[in-house]
Image (cartoon, grey):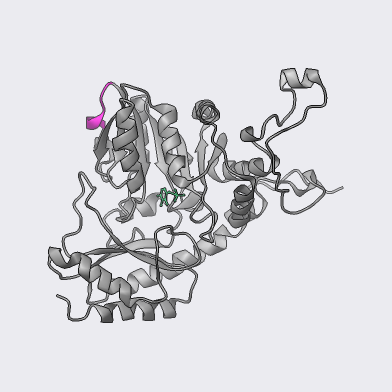
Amino acid sequence: MRDHDKSPRNIGPNTQLVRAGYDPFEYHGFINPPTVHASTVLFPDAGTMEQHGQQYTYATRGTPTTDALCDAINELEGAAGTILLPSGLAAVTVPLLAYLAKGDHALIVDSVYGNVRHFCDTMLARFGVEVDYYDPSIGAAIEELFKPNTRLVHTEAPGSNTFEIQDIPAITSVAHRHRAVVTMDNTWATPLYFRPLDFGVDISIQASTKYPAGHADILMGTVSANESHWRRLKQANGQLGLCGTPDDAYQVLRGLRTMGVRLERHQRSALALAEWLQEQPDVARVLHPALPSFPGHDIWKRDFKGASGVFSLVLKGSRKDDFKMKAQAFLDGLSLFGLGYSWGGFQSLALHVELDDRRILEAPSEGPVVRLQIGLEDVADLKADLERGFQAIAGIQ
Ligand SMILES: *Cc1c(COP(=O)(O)O)cnc(C)c1O
């Protein structure tokens, strides 16, 4: 018998992605886990039932399929436990509900995913939680924003749409001195390129909708906790009754197996296009953390192992009143780039970014901001498509 249980130690990230979370010999050697559709779980006798004396008791609390995914995510994140949620947005809102109560104060990064801001300003406000937004470049100076009732700091790096990098170790050490929990939306980097828990974050969040699923056809989120915060997260999830479906869990685990090679390709193509875009006469700036010209580049380089395929460019030279018109002309000039929101799939996407919900950060003044997701197409074709976009705005001042 070969020893199937023991994975060799110190394996690389792609080897880990191939093996994580499921042992084929737990299910007859089939290399992928079974998709268990269930609500009811049967018990062999009344005594076992009274004691909940078996691994599975009710499918909202997990099945072999959802466990295979959660175990894989635990390995990748270095986490004590992971919960599945029906979307990436829920993966941010559920920890906020789990760790905040009436009278608490939370610090939320100003470059946060927009729908999270909306949740904070509406539902959290209604529940009596006070929220302040902070500058993503604040670092250790976040200490000045702490109040006696500050219980949580939410981070996201790079920030949505404008890609500001945060000094996560500086923020976590201040937060922990004040006994606050630190949550991080790590959707852009995935645990392959940044492992939040290794940098002191307590709760690592991923919209698995994006790179883990990878094919623009699944909605799911994961929340992974360190040892000290896992119990409360799991409890909150049980109280709310949220869970991931078996089919989606299966598909996300399937996507994870190839995420490493897809990310390498997204990274390489995106960086090549970002560098090329910097040189284009119609472009004022490119917002991509792996470019040395980007303000947070040094921290990105210190902490991150790679960059994914989403970044923004600022078009040059139009009057503020014409930003929208110019952005729309550029987008309508593209044909390979789809116009769509949810990135992380195989196809390249573009959209005009509106930044008018920001409280602290100023939107770039040079021109409209266009966010690109670089998909798996050939770079030369994408370059030609972007050139069509520039042709479409020729003559618009
Ligand atoms: C897309 C996204 C989400 C939300 O994911 P959904 O599954 O679409 O709800 C959350 N955070 C970030 C950073 C995202 O890009």
Q: Is residue 148 above or below residue 174?
A: above
- Magenta residue check for 147: yes
Residue 90 in the image: state x and y as whole percent: 45, 41
Q: Is residue 245 above or below residue 56?
A: below
Q: In the image shown, does 159 or 215 lie closer to the viewer?
A: 215
Q: Is residue 190 above or below residue 234?
A: below
Please state the extent of the stretch shown in magenta in the rendering: 143-148
**Residue 12 shows up from this direction:** no
Q: Residue at x 51, y 34 (%)?
A: 225
Residue 373 in the image: state x and y as whole percent: 40, 64
**Residue 137 shows up from this direction:** yes
Residue 178 in the image: state x and y as whole percent: 33, 25
Q: Residue at x 13, y 64 (%)?
A: 321
- Magenta residue check for 153: no
Q: Quadrant of residue 292?
A: bottom left
Residue 96 in the image: state x and y as whole percent: 40, 33
Indicate left or right for 325 with 49 as reference: left
Q: Quadrant of residue 176?
A: top left
Q: Residue at x 27, y 82 (%)?
A: 391
The residue furthest right is 1
